Image (cartoon, grey):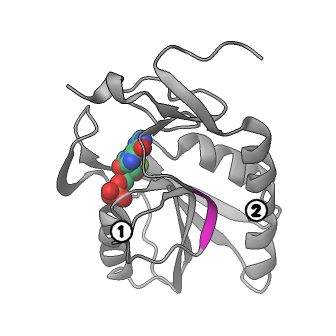
Amino acid sequence: MNELHPDLARVLVSEEAIQGRVTELAQQLAHDYADVERIFLVGILKGAFIFLADLARQLSKSHSVDFMALSSYGDTTTSTGEVRLIMDLREPIQDKHVVIVEDIVDSGRTLKYLYRVLGEREPASLKTCVLVRKERDSLDVVVDYLGFDIPDVWVVGYGLDFADNHRTLPFIAELKESVYAD
Ligand code: IMP
Ligand code: MG
């Protein structure tokens, strides 16, 4: 295997593990939504674009794809605590079966914001599909479809970034603390 980039401490979820789990999630979605005409996938930019691309291509059930862009962090690992809507969906979601596709749940603020904002638009159903969730005591937000639980460290790869770096790695790796601690 190639050497890890010096910013990275270790691989937490391998490319093989991700691909296997994405296939399983797509199969589970197709099974659970068998009686529904169409799934409306909402990818949260930027982080979810790679996960969504792989998930959607594995999904045998008919589906639409749309995007929202949100921001809760600046270009560091320090949360501002506030979620901002940068770009909204193109289409209304009323009476649609919506699945929010997100890269990671950390504090859960982003997902809570999405439940509230999208819930107000009266979709037929609203669920969430998240690739990784950080293990934290205080998390009280529902994830319907989850890829992996990971430790509470900063991770990059497979869509996840640090200041827009390392986003396109095929695996998920832990960033060395020395890279983001000042
Ligand atoms: P939350 O609102 O605290 O759950 O944070 C969710 C958002 O913060 C994610 O959509 C990511 O954009 C970002 N984020 C949180 N933790 C990480 C991480 O470890 N690596 C990269 N981005 C992260
Ligand atoms: Mg995100």
Point out which mark residue 122 bears.
none
| Residue 70 place in picture, x, y as percent | 31, 51
- Residue at point 41%, 76% (across, down): 141
Q: Is residue 92 above or below residue 132?
A: below
* Dot label at residue 114: 1
Residue 132 to residue 159: above or below: below
On screen, residue 50 above or below 21: above
Residue 163: in sight, yes or no? no
The three-letter amino acid code for the residue at tag 2 is: Ala
In-image side of 64 versus 80 (left or right): right
Q: Is residue 169 visible?
A: yes
Q: Earlier in the sequence, mark 2 or mark 1?
A: 2
Q: Position of residue 116 (x, y in %)?
A: 31, 77
Q: How many marks?
A: 2
Q: Position of residue 60 (x, y in %)?
A: 83, 62
> Which one is nearer the viewer's eye here, 102 or 147?
147
Q: Is residue 105 left or right of residue 28?
A: left
Q: Mark 1: which amino acid?
A: Leu
- Residue that mark 2 sits on: 26
Q: Quadrant of the N terminus?
A: top right
Among the 4 quarters of the image, the one containing residue 53: top right
In-front residue for pair 92/131: 131
In the image, what residue occupies the spot 61% across and 17% down?
4
Q: Pick the residue in front: 1 or 101.
A: 1
By secondary structure, the bulk of the magenta-drawn segment is best described as strand
C-alpha gap between disc 2 and disc 1: 21 Å
The residue segment tinted magenta is 145-149
Q: Position of residue 180 (x, y in %)?
A: 30, 28
